[in-house]
Image: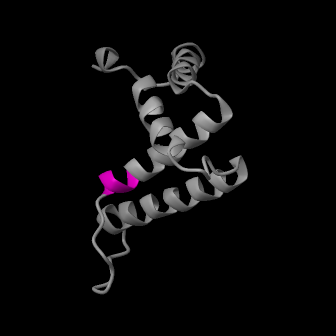
């Protein structure tokens, strides 16, 4: 994750404009998430794609979401690997008995 954050920072750092404001990036993240939701709905939901709509891969849309999330983390000084570790610890403790484990099934 650190390498991805550095790669995005190097890319953005070559432009005078730099990172967008946190509010603008939140809007962009929402936009990209909407595009991902639309693709998932076309592939797995009840809403088929119109014949005039461009075919996009779910993978590409996830990449767009990830890129904007990394931009936002970089601009706010958030270490995404550390954020991931915090969340995983929360799930390991708070939700440890919430779900049925595969090894507990009959």
Assess whether residue 56 is covered by the magenta stretch. no
Q: Residue at x 51, y 45 (%)?
A: 12
Q: Quadrant of residue 51?
A: bottom left
Residue 68: x, y in percent?
52, 48
Q: Which one is in front, 7 or 49? A: 7
Residue beneath the point at 54% across and 21% down: 91
Relative to 106, is 60 above or below? Answer: below
Which quadrant is home to the C terminus? top left
Name the spot of residue 70 as percent of width and height, x first.
Answer: 52, 39
* Residue sitting at x 41%, y 32%: 4
User: Magenta residues: mostly which secondary structure?
Assistant: helix
Q: How many numbered tags mark residues here? A: 0
Residue at the extreme bottom of the image, as rendered: 52
In the rendered view, would you say 87 is above or below 20? above
Residue 46, given in percent of the width and then of the height, sits at: 36, 71
Q: Is residue 64 left or right of residue 90?
A: left
Q: Is residue 12 above or below residue 96?
A: below
- Magenta range is 58-62
């Amino acid at each position: 994750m650190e390498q991805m954050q550095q790669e995005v920072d190097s890319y953005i750092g070559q432009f005078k404009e730099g990172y967008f404001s946190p509010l603008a990036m939140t809007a962009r993240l929402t936009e990209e998430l909407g595009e991902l939701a639309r693709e998932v709905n076309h592939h797995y939901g009840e809403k088929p794609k119109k014949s005039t709509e461009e075919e996009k891969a779910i993978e590409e849309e996830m990449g767009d979401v990830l890129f904007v999330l990394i931009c936002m983390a970089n601009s706010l000084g958030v270490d995404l690997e550390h954020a991931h570790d915090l969340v995983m610890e929360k799930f390991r403790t708070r939700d440890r008995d919430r779900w049925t484990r595969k090894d507990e099934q009959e």
